[in-house]
Amino acid sequence: MPALDAPVFVAGHRGLVGSALRRRLEAAGHTNILTATRSELDLRHQSAVDEWFEHHRPEFVYLVAGTVGGIEANRTRPAEFLYDNMMIHGTVVHAAHRVGVRRLLYLGSSCIYPRHAPQPIPESALLTGPLEPTNESYALAKIAGIKLCESYRAQYGADFISAMPTNLYGPGDNFDLTASHVIPALMRKFHDAKIRGEVEVPIWGTGSAMREFLHVDDLADACVFLMEHYDEPGHINVGTGEDLPIRRLAEQIRDIVHPDAELVFDTSKPDGMPRKLLDVSKLERLGWKASVDLATGLRSTYDWFLEHASDARGV
């Protein structure tokens, strides 16, 4: 267990996950949380990352930085998603090994699994079939990150672990429609329609795709738990173990944001994977389970958006 005064580096502290993780660490009493903005440290440059690690000597690292986005962002920027994420993972993992970091937690994504993986998806489903085409580049980068941590563990004995969260949402999310994931995108669409006095709100796909959603504060708590209790070469899933159709999700968000709205499904747009529900039995056996229910999480996320509406369009 990291001492409260041990230097802990949160790589990506301004992002959705990083900001929640920083809040969680501060609440636990950690007094030596290391951070670096993109202008201070470009995580894609090995020499810069090596120099930063040599100077700051972190003992624990949460590697939660990366280039992220929804279906449209993945579709239009595949090279950026692949390059940025592979470079970020490579530089930080290598630098952590060079300076002797005691433990590193690498955060991936549930998109690593095959499009037609068994449901719920066990960790063993990795690399057993073709990926979902709409986020293949991002998934490949995340898979490479998992294997990188496993390889440094196998070759050098590095205590590097990997966790794969399901779809995330919560305060600090990106509400820019060109890059956001489904929950902030839907909230933004319903919110804008309400402001403009519009009734019909377009929803991508058929609404039949099944998805699982995890509040980012739950993920932050899980990351801290895993840093203290997990030490295995294989990755571990993090989720709620429950899912719902996108149609039902849209209806719940509609009821919170714009109750008078009508859902119009644009079936020319992709659904993505038919279903993506993680098997979280491995994590639950360790003693951790999600605590924020979806209804509560959606309401608090929209409240956050209303409080930050002036800058929530491209966080």
Image: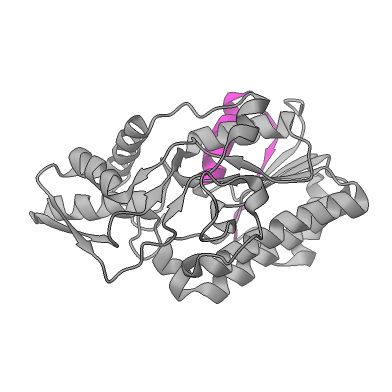
Q: Residue at x 26, y 49 (%)?
A: 247
Q: Is residue 206 above or below residue 228?
A: below
x and y percent of residue 49 in the render?
75, 59
Q: What percent of the width, then of the height, locates residue 83?
A: 63, 71
The quarter of the displayed image where residue 27 is located: top right
Q: How is the image coloured?
A: one colour
Q: Which residue occupies the foreground of this view, 256 or 20? A: 256
Is-magenta flag for residue 281? no
Query: Residue at coordinates 79% horizontally, 66% vertically from top-left?
Result: 47
| 204 over 220 or under it: above or below | below
Q: Quadrant of residue 255?
A: top left
Relative horizontal placement of residue 201, taking residue 118 as reference (left or right): left
- Could you tell me which residue is drawn at 60 percent across and 61 percent down? 39
Viewed as shown, does residue 14 lie left or right of 204?
right
- Give the x, y percent position of residue 99: 87, 50
- As drawn, 5 above or below 191: above
Decide which of 312, 287 is in the foreground and name it.
287
Vertical placement of 121 versus 225: above or below? below
Residue 315, how many percent across, how many down?
Answer: 42, 54
Dividing the picture into quarters, in which one does residue 203 lie?
bottom left
For the image, the number of numbered tags is 0
Question: Magenta includes 23?
Answer: yes
Q: Is residue 199 shown left or right of residue 161?
A: left
- The extreme right residue here reads 156
Residue 187 seen: yes
Viewer can see residue 52: no
Image quadrant holding the N terminus, namely: top right
Task: Please provide the residue range marked out in magenta.
Answer: 17-38
